[in-house]
Every structure is written in C-alpha cells, then in structure tokens.
Amino acid sequence: MVEHELPKLVAWVRFPSPAPFRLGKRMKAILKTIKKFFKPEYKKAFLVTIKCHDCEEEVSVRINRSADFQLDYNPKNPKHFYTIKKEIIGKNCYNLMQLEIALTKNTKVLYTNTKSCDFVKFDKE
C-alpha cells in the first residue's frame, strides 16, 4: 500500500481588528444590580485617633472589624460586647502607646483605657 501525502498548504489570512468592547446601557444596569448583592451592608473598618503624651502627635489607626474586634461576653456588664486592644508607635517618636476600647453591640464606645497617649476619637471609615 502506498501512503499518499497531502500537500502542505499554508495560507495566512488577516482578520480585521475587532471593534472596541462596549457595554450597552442594559448590561451596565444588570452589572450594577449584581454588584449590590456582593457589597457588605456595613463598613468593615473604623478609624481611631490618639494623641501621644511625649510629642503630642496625633496618630490615626485603622481597625479592621473582622480581625481586630474581640468578642467579649461579660454577664455583669451585658452592654460590653467587643474589645479592641492595640499597641501603636508614632512616626515622630518611638513611644509605645497602648489602647484598649470597649464597645457595645452597635459599636458605640463604652470606655477606653490608654497608656502614654490620649484618646481623641473613634469614627466609622
């Protein structure tokens, strides 16, 4: 049996470049409604501002709700729900500032304990 070889044909074809991809108004509206389902209802971070005793520098610290909040149940004080503990070093001096904040379930400040700093404010991001 003789095997037949097929002739090798090489043809280069140039296709026109595709038109730029644009979303229609309807598709944009659909994507917008889909994004609403994946956005969290609350902000996940808070900002705490403290003031150093030594150099009087104000330092803002970002507190992540999922990582820094410690769930704390105390039957003697049922309002106390979360505890945040942070150790902060400023940019101007290397004074170690310690901060402890007790929060309610609605993230309102019950009390603060500070060491070598003053508590200024607690804000939602």
Image: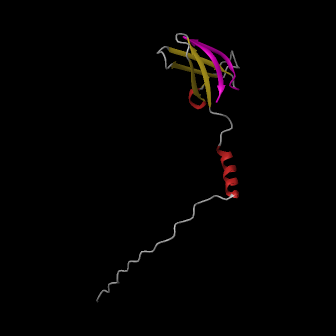
Q: Is residue 90 above or below residue 43?
A: above
Q: Position of residue 82 (x, y in %)?
A: 63, 23
Q: Residue at x 61, y 22 (%)?
A: 48
**Does the stretch in magenta take in 110?**
yes
Q: Position of residue 4 (x, y in %)?
A: 32, 86
Quarter containing the N terminus: bottom left
Q: Nearer the viewer, residue 75 or 94?
A: 94
Q: Nearer the viewer, residue 59 or 6?
A: 59
Q: Position of residue 121 (x, y in %)?
A: 65, 19
Q: How is the image coloured?
A: secondary structure
Magenta range is: 106-125
Q: Position of residue 118 (x, y in %)?
A: 60, 13
Extreme-left residue of the structure? 1
Left-right relation of 9 to 115: left
Q: Main secondary structure of the magenta part?
A: strand
Q: Quadrant of residue 68?
A: top right
Quarter containing the C terminus: top right
Q: Is residue 63 above or below residue 36?
A: above
Q: Nearer the viewer, residue 93 or 36?
A: 93
